[in-house]
Amino acid sequence: MIQALRGMKDIIPPDNERFVHIIETASAVARRYGYEYIETPLLEETALFKRSVGESSDIVGKEMYQFVDKGGHDVCLRPEGTAGVVRMFIQNKLDKKGGIHRFFYHGPMFRYERPQKGRLREFHQFGCESFGEGSVYEDFTLILMIKDIFDALGIGYKILVNSLGCPECMPGYRERLVAHLNDIKDGLCEDCQRRIATNPIRVLDCKVDSCQVLLANAPVLTDNLCETCDADFATLTKLLEKHGLPFELDPKLVRGLDYYTRTAFEFVSDEIGAQSAIAGGGRYNRLVEFLGGKPTPAVGFALGVERIMELVKMPEKGREGLYLGVMEPQALESVLAIAHRKRQSEKVYVEYNKKSLKAHLKAADRVGAKLCAIVGEDELKAGEIWVKDLETKEERRVAIDEF
Ligand code: HAM
């Protein structure tokens, strides 16, 4: 038997309802915030992710579904959405156009990670990217929008925030951090020792306990910000406080992608186990320029649909729609015509096979229909239909035309 690949899941009833509910809710909120829906390809040139997400990141270093296509191109299934949206933004010359552009998207992402609860190899994100607005108010508004999405879905969360600085303050911080890391190098895990040269900031969020003990005295990012980054971060946290958002400063929140500058944030839930991040994002003011476009400030986020599915409770579904059946095959034509008319405004199930009344009622109950309507021999002669409301148990016979 051929099975789905490890870490990849079918989204089927009854979970499909929660999946659609999340996408529809998030899309409606995003539209209210002025975001427009876009699609970008699932496959992109590998170089796009190497340059944006970063060669030294785990995503690019270990987790990409990368292959050479029939034309000899080095391509990759997208591990995240931002890089493709930025490529689209530059390719369509929106950077040259200027102004503000806000987009949302949703779809599958692929990361060859070790599958576990909440961690898949194919998973779905809903994401938003805002281009052209450098103000920290945009960062705040984006966080507020995620709050609105989670409130609409009835989900609890905590927000972790940090600032990753800018080209002015980051190099100085990096130097201080590297000096400190070299002092404690011998006690660090192998990965961290390697990262000192390739990506020292990532050492900060190492999950190995002994590394975290040694990092207790490491220089703190937010103590080393330049004046502008510091002022922006203060504005952001003040706004979060003022609006009563549940947040915590997390100076070790560095995110697993290399393109962030200034604001970085994550929404976490304590109800879904170790993989607790349900959304993540931040500002990436240098990425458009880095990929060849005109310097354009940008900020965005993505939420993980499967992780949120674990948290969303759907309201109990009542009976819905109409079940239509026949007890005489000659009645099927008129039943098909009724079904088509009714389908213009409601959900209709049609049973093509002749069955007993009892069997029809059982089938109508099984599909969750509210009304069960049957044409039998008598009804056929009289041009009528027998209708039972499966909620109120009320029965009646009415003229087909009237029905
Ligand atoms: P990310 O933090 O890598 O950010 O992913 C966003 C969300 O996707 C995570 O918070 C998590 O809920 C979900 N997720 C990530 N990996 C997996 C997995 N293996 N299985 C299930 N869910 C997963 C980004 O991807 C950035 N592009 C976000 C962004 C947009 N930053 C700026 N704009």
Image (tube, grey):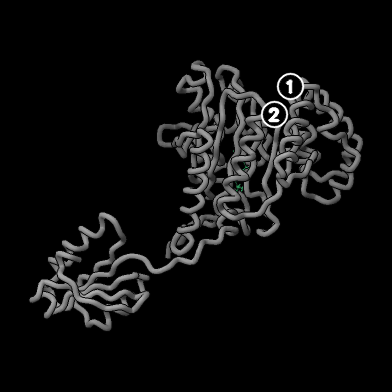
User: In front: 401, or 96?
Assistant: 401
Which residue has dot 2 on it?
261
Q: Quadrant of residue 293?
A: top right
Tag 1: Cα neighbours inside 10 Å, few (<14), some, or many (≥20)? few
| Callouts 2 and 1 close, C-beta under 8 Å | yes
Give the mark nearer the N terminus: 2 vs 1. 1
Q: Position of residue 226 (x, y in %)?
A: 80, 23
Q: Position of residue 112 (x, y in %)?
A: 58, 48
Secondary structure beneath disc 2?
Answer: loop
Q: Residue at x 88, y 37 (%)?
A: 218
User: In front: 126, or 121?
Assistant: 126
Residue 400 visible at all: yes
Q: Position of residue 221 (x, y in %)?
A: 81, 33
Q: Is residue 277 left or right of residue 69?
A: right
- Name the quarter showing ligand 1: top right
Secondary structure beneath disc 1?
Answer: loop
Residue type for callout 2: Thr
Q: Is residue 338 above or below residue 133?
A: below
User: In front: 20, or 144?
Assistant: 144
Which residue has dot 1 on it?
167
